[in-house]
């Protein structure tokens, strides 16, 4: 019997803030949880990585003169807060979840152990990977790529504010051109800022496809999980 499809969803921390500049917007978290629950109910094994920008932005001014390693650790802790918020919203919808943290904090999350994470997915639990890779100088994009490769996800799906990858920022340039498909090398050579170069190179070297899609359009998560043509495919 074929294994069920497995997807890793990368959500920005800003997505949890709704329209606010920082913080957690309860209605937005519930909406995202509802869409994630729909994907899980369709038979897809779901893992998540959530950024921390919505919380870290609130202290960014104070962090400007900090040591980079300290600031990065603060950002990792922000992702734990977001992961717990999303986990709680999913549990209220009777969807079992596990938050697994790369930084050990036994009172609030399981330590990340690859084989245990895969077992949770096989049992139908939604796994939320928190605290990045536990290493400074690595973005949550890179953490998402690493976890996707470790759990052998079929696709890395990144939800953004726009409906795919463009040759320039569509929020600033009305004539920006959207790509339906683009190669890893084209993303790197053109310096397209959809994800950092480390994560794109890792996906290229391991042939992990990336789908970049509009997170604000209802139903897009489910469409991506069904391999429908949504957003931009980086391959």
Image: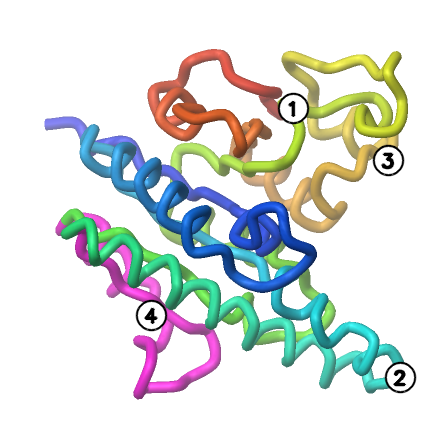
Of the two numbered discs 1 and 3 on the same chain, state the one appearing first in sequence: 1
Q: Earlier in the sequence, mark 2 or mark 4?
A: 2
Dot 3 crowding, Cα within 10 Å, few <14, some 14–19, many 20+: some
Which secondary structure, mark 4?
loop
Question: Which mark is drawn over residue 191?
Answer: 3
Alpha carbons under labels 3 and 4: distance apart: 34 Å
Q: Determine whether label 2 and label 4 are within 8 Å by CB.
A: no
The answer to which of 156 and 175 lies nearer the viewer is 175
Residue 188 lies, with reference to residue 96, above or below; the image says above
Quadrant assignment for the N terminus:
top left
Which of the 4 image quadrants contains residue 13?
bottom right
Q: Which residues are magenta?
A: 95-123
Q: Which residue occupies 36% across, 69% down?
A: 100
C-alpha separation, residue under disc 4 versus residue under disc 1: 32 Å
Spot occupied by residue 204 in the image (x, y as percentages of width and height): 63, 35
Q: Which mark is residue 65?
A: 2
Q: Is residue 7 left or right of residue 1?
A: right
Residue that label 1 marks: 164
Tell which tag, 3 or 4, sits nearer the viewer: 3
**Which of disc 2 and disc 3 is earlier in sequence?**
2
Q: Are marks 2 and 1 in contact (CB under 8 Å)?
A: no
Q: CA distance from mark 1 to mark 3?
A: 15 Å
Classify 10 Å Cα crowding around label 2: few (below 14), some (14-19), many (20 and above): few
Front of the two marks 1 and 3: 1
Residue under circle 4?
113
**Rendered residue at 26%/33% (across/down):** 38
């Amino acid at each position: 019997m074929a294994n069920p499809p497995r997807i890793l969803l990368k959500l920005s921390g800003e997505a949890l803030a709704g329209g606010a500049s920082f913080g957690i917007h309860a209605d937005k978290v519930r909406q995202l949880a509802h869409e994630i629950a729909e994907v899980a109910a369709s038979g897809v094994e779901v893992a998540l990585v959530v950024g921390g920008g919505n919380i870290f932005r609130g202290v960014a001014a104070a962090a400007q003169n900090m040591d980079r390693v300290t600031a990065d650790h603060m950002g990792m802790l922000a992702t734990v807060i977001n992961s717990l918020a999303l986990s709680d919203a999913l549990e209220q919808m009777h969807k079992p979840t596990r938050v697994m943290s790369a930084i050990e904090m036994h009172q609030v999350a399981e330590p990340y152990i690859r084989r245990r994470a895969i077992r949770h997915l096989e049992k139908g639990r939604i796994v939320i990977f928190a605290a990045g890779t536990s290493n400074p100088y690595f973005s949550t994009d890179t953490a998402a790529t690493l976890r996707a490769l470790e759990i052998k996800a079929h696709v890395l799906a990144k939800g953004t504010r726009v409906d795919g990858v463009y040759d320039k920022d569509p929020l600033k340039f009305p004539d920006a051109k959207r790509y339906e498909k683009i190669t890893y090398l084209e993303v790197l050579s053109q310096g397209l800022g959809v994800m950092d170069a480390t994560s794109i190179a890792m996906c290229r070297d391991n042939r992990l496809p990336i789908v970049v899609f509009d997170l604000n359009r209802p139903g897009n998560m489910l469409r991506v999980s069904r391999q429908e043509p949504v957003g931009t495919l980086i391959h």
